[in-house]
Structure formats: C-alpha cells, structure tokens
Image (cartoon, rainbow, N blue to C red):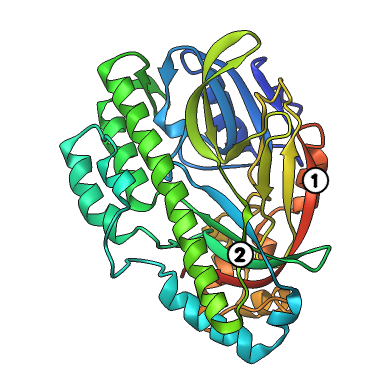
Amino acid sequence: MSRNLPQNVKSWLVEPLPDDVFRAVERVARAPDVVRVALMPDVHLANDVCVGTVMATRELIYPAAVGGDIGCGIAAVALDGSEQLLRDARFAQELLDRLRSSVPVHRHGGGALPESLAAQAISDSRLESVRRREGAVQFGTLGRGNHFLEFQVDDEDRLWLMVHSGSRAMGQAIRDLHVARATSAGGGLTYLRAGTQEGDAYIVDTNWARAYAAANRRAMLDAAVAALTALSGTKAVSSTYFDCDHNHVRHEVHFGESFWVHRKGAMSAGSDEPGILPGSMATKSFHVAGRGNAEALRSSSHGAGRAMSRSEARQRVKSADVLRQMRSVWFDPNALPALREEAPSAYKDIRAVLRAQSDLTRVVRRLRPVLVYKGT
C-alpha cells in the first residue's frame, strides 16, 4: 500500500520508511507549530523524534527534536604522517593501550572543567550540581555506544584523526529538567515556548551543552595526538582542525522567515559549510561541503545511520561476524563481544546515503579507517 507523508515533510531516503518510523514522522509533522520537516537518508527510529529529522517551528521548541546528547558531533584533524605508521601490529597495539589511558571511556581522574565552561551561565542550581560533578569528571571522556575515536587515511595517504562524541551526562540532565517543565503536545511530545523564561532557559543550557561537547572533542583529539606523538613523533596539523555537531536547535532564517530549526542526527549544510559523514567501523567516512539546499532546511545526514537497532544487532550479529568485517582495521579484540551492536553490518551503506543526498552535500575527501578505538 502506498503511503503519503504529510505535505510539510520533504525526504531524501535510501529506502521506504518502516511503519514505526512513518508513524513517528507523521506524529511530529502534525504537532503544534511544526511548519516544515526534512528527513535525511540516515533516518531511523528513536524516542519520540527519529534520528535524521530536521524540524522548523516559529515559536515552540521541542526538546525531543534535539535529544539528550545535545551538541553531539564530530571533529577531525590531519596528522603529519602516513599509513605506514600503523602497519605494524605492535605499534597499533601500543597506541590502543595508550588511548585507553589518555582518552577514558567513563570518568576522568582529573575532574576539572576548562575555566570558560565553568564560568559560562547555566539556568538552574540542579544543573550546576551536575556540572560540578559529572560534567567535570566526564570532560575528556569518550562515552559508549556509537561514539568513537578513529585514525584514518585519505586518498593521498595522509593520516587523519576523527572523534565522535557529545555532552555526556550533562546533555541528558538538561533534557530531563526541561522536559519536566514542558507542555504536552500529545503523542509523547512536549514543547517550550520561545521568549518565555522556560524557553529561554532551555536555549541557554543547550548552548552551554554544545560548547561543552565541542570542547570535549577537542580535548580528546589533543590527548590522542599526544599519545601518537609520544610513540612516533607524529603531530597534528592544527590548521586542518574542524568540528560540526548534529544535535541542536538554533534560530535561523529560511524562505525569508525566522524559524527555530531543530536537528536531531542531522548536520547543518549551508553553502560550502564543512561537514563530516562517518560510515562505520570498517567503511569509509567522508568530509563534505554543504550545498545549501533550501528544501532540506540547509541540512544533511550525519552519517550512515543504523540499519539495525542495538538490540537487533546483539541478536543477529555474532562476534565472528564483527571479526570478519573488521579484518583490515586495528581494534581491541577484548572488546569484540560488546562491539556486536556497532558492527559495520548494523549500519546503512554510507555510499547509498551520499547518493540519496547528492543535492545536499558534495564530497571533499574520502577516508578509510585504519585503527578504531571505541568505548564499551
């Protein structure tokens, strides 16, 4: 049976939407004050609002259309070395060992925030308490799930380093506090009204979370580069560093009108705006430039997107499958059982995603994974 999405929805899809995703998109598109929705090729089911959704409103702000990992994104920097460095198994293992200590997954022993983050305004004393505790001890840490740090090589045999992470416990605390204050829109969705004390407080806190997430990525890249430099003398080329996030809400002008644009698992892709699209642990990633497509609210996908939920991957993917799929990439074999939910086969084909959004981005650089460090 053919199905038509609501008229305020535009889509760039790799495949037809599953029934549960279709229903979730319909619910969002018909929510109060939702003027436009753009679905990215990596769209997949998530709580309340699907990952890969871009949504524009005039006055209402929907925390679920940003999610809990506020400011989650990707940063990359080139290195002054080649893949030759990582062709030796002993060197690769030593680097992985150093990454485990220099880029912790859970809590960092230092437990201190940069002064700029510690001094920046946050809206509520309860969030201030979280900032002093979890915010400090988790700064410089990677997190679990699909977050990773990866050494890659481009088509010119140049090494790159990429990290994917977000605002850790801070983003979740900010979401939970503001959802508790929000107004129900039905269907599990809640909203805050821009220009009110509650709406303005949410924007202040999400802006802080975005700054935290970006600084966290930079701190992890610096620590990983330091580990590599200690082993080989290889350094970062600081002028190549760039960062983009894919969970945010901000005020933008589209079609001559001001909107609150929510992106959940979607990047901003203005004309020539740089972005990063990861594939999976064993497939290529891409540096891209935006095309500024107006119908897509100047947005693009944020990566390959999941083809299987984590629970489905744990049921269907065996450790032997991961080992076979990762045969050309260094990783920690002790993490093998836990990596089944992040197996390359659990993700969509990044090439199909790029084809589906050829009018949203253009490829600037292709990168092949060489060594992957993931939190488990």
- Mark 1 or mark 2, which has the lower sequence index? 2
Q: Mark 1 points at which residue?
A: 363
- Number of residues whose C-alpha sits closer than 10 Å to that of mark 2, classed few (under 14), some (14–19) or many (20 or more): many
Q: Nearer the viewer, residue 279 or 200?
A: 200
| 285 w.r.t. 69: above or below | below
Location of residue 283 by image quarter: bottom right
Q: Amino acid under label 2?
A: Ala
SS type, badge 1:
strand
On screen, 236 above or below 358?
below
Residue 250 place in picture, x, y as percent: 48, 26
**Number of the front mark, 1 or 2:** 2
Where is residue 331? Give x, y as percent.
60, 78
Distance Cα–Cα, label 1 vs label 2: 23 Å
Residue drawn at the location 79% of the way across and 47% of the way down: 364
The quarter of the picture where residue 80 lies is bottom right
Which residue is pictured at 48% across the width and 55% down the height? 217
Q: Residues within 10 Å of mark 1 (few under 14, many from 20)?
A: some
Q: Residue 288, percent across and down?
A: 74, 44
Instruction: Using the image, determine if residue 43 lies above or below residue 34.
Output: below
Left or right: 63, with 319 as reference point: left
Q: In which quarter of the image is the N terminus?
A: top right
Q: What residue type is labelled 1?
A: Val
Asked whether the beta carbons under mark 1 and mark 2 sit within 8 Å of each other, the answer is no
Q: What mark, if any, has residue 345 been given in the picture?
A: none
Relative to residue 333, is residue 4 depicted above or below? above
Q: Can residue 10 be seen in this view?
A: yes
Q: Name the residue under label 2.
A: 236
- Where residue 248 appears, as percent x and y from the top left, is 48, 34
For residue 73, side relative to residue 302 (left or right): left
Residue 251 appears left or right of 291 = left
Residue drawn 34% across the image and 37% down it: 175
In the foreground, 132 or 182: 132
